[in-house]
């Protein structure tokens, strides 16, 4: 069974641009969550989707948005990029809607560098 | 507010020796705790979780964790370390509000270095 696939693996953008990251969950998984990982702030929750609905959102500005499609694939978008948005963006999928019942499976991430 | 703390940025241990990676938590209700491991340039992998029941939880790759309610701790342990265990380890707590969720709050991570 294929794991969580994130594309692209690496991305270099310029300040002010926008970017879209993609995540394909494990087949059958309906939940997708996004996390930002930086050396200074560690792992921070962005948002989670379950059956195309955003259930939770972290404390990030409105420049960060996401969506989930009917096939459970998810995208996140960052507009008006800032240098501080440089990070590893991790996507995680889960079979069920609560991590108490099934663990999060993480992709290898997209490394975004903003110059 | 819910939080987890990992007081050690790095833990060094010799191969074959027991290892402990520390985690303490702060929650207002019953804690739901997790350990994940991250290898270089990879995502996180689930090791184990505590929801209820036995205080000693066994997980993947020979790891176990001990839940201690009085000390609000959930330390990760392994009886005999391997060089291949060298990685970044994260403790996490599931948020308690809002019903069913996959939202986790992670600690800052502890780098485990196992010397041959």
Image (cartoon, rainbow, N blue to C red):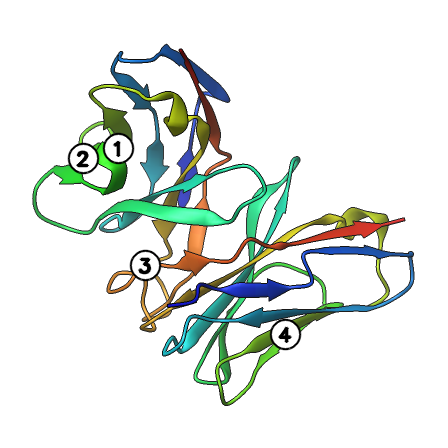
Q: Disc 4 and disc 2: Cα gap in Å?
A: 39 Å
Residue identifier under label 3: A103
Q: Residue at x 55, y 53 (%)?
A: A108
Q: Residues within 10 Å of mark 4 (few under 14, many from 20)?
A: many
Q: Secondary structure at mark 2?
A: loop
Q: Residue furthest left?
A: B54
- Examine the image and state in which quarter residue A35 appears: bottom right
Whether residue B74 is visible, yes or no, is: yes
Checking the image for residue A89, the label placed there is none
Q: Chain of mark 2?
A: B
Q: Residue at x 42, y 54 (%)?
A: B104
User: Do the residues bearing badges 2 and 1 touch, measured as CB atoms within 8 Å?
Assistant: yes
Q: Disc 3 and disc 2: Cα gap in Å?
A: 23 Å
Q: Residues within 10 Å of mark 2 (few under 14, many from 20)?
A: few
| B9 relative position to B26: left or right | right
Specify whether disc 3 shares its chain with disc 4: yes
Q: Is label 3 or label 2 in front?
A: 3
Whether residue B1 is visible, yes or no, is: no
Specify whether disc 4 shares its chain with disc 1: no
Q: Is residue A27 above or below residue B9?
A: below
Q: Chain of mark 3?
A: A
Checking the image for residue B69, the label placed there is 2
Q: Secondary structure at mark 4?
A: strand
Q: Is label 1 or label 3 in front?
A: 3
């Amino acid at each position: 069974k294929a794991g969580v696939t994130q594309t692209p693996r690496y991305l270099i953008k310029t300040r002010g641009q926008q970017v879209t990251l993609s995540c394909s969950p494990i087949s059958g998984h309906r939940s997708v969550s996004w996390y930002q990982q930086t050396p200074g702030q560690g792992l921070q929750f962005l948002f989670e989707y379950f059956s195309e609905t955003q259930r939770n959102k972290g404390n990030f500005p409105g420049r960060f948005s996401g969506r989930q499609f009917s096939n459970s694939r998810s995208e996140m978008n960052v507009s008006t990029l800032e240098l501080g948005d440089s990070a590893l963006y991790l996507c995680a999928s889960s079979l069920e809607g609560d991590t108490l019942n099934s663990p999060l499976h993480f992709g290898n991430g997209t490394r975004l560098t903003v110059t | 507010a819910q939080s987890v703390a990992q007081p050690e940025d790095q833990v060094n241990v010799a191969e074959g020796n027991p290892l402990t990676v520390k985690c303490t938590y702060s929650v207002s209700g019953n804690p739901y705790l997790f350990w994940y491991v991250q290898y270089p340039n990879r995502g996180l992998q689930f090791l184990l979780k505590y929801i209820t029941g036995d205080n000693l939880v066994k997980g993947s790759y020979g790891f176990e964790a001990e839940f201690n309610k009085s000390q609000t701790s959930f330390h990760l342990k392994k009886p005999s370390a391997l060089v291949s265990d060298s990685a970044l380890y994260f403790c996490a707590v599931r948020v308690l509000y809002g019903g069913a969720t996959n939202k986790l709050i992670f600690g800052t991570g502890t780098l485990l270095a196992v010397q041959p």
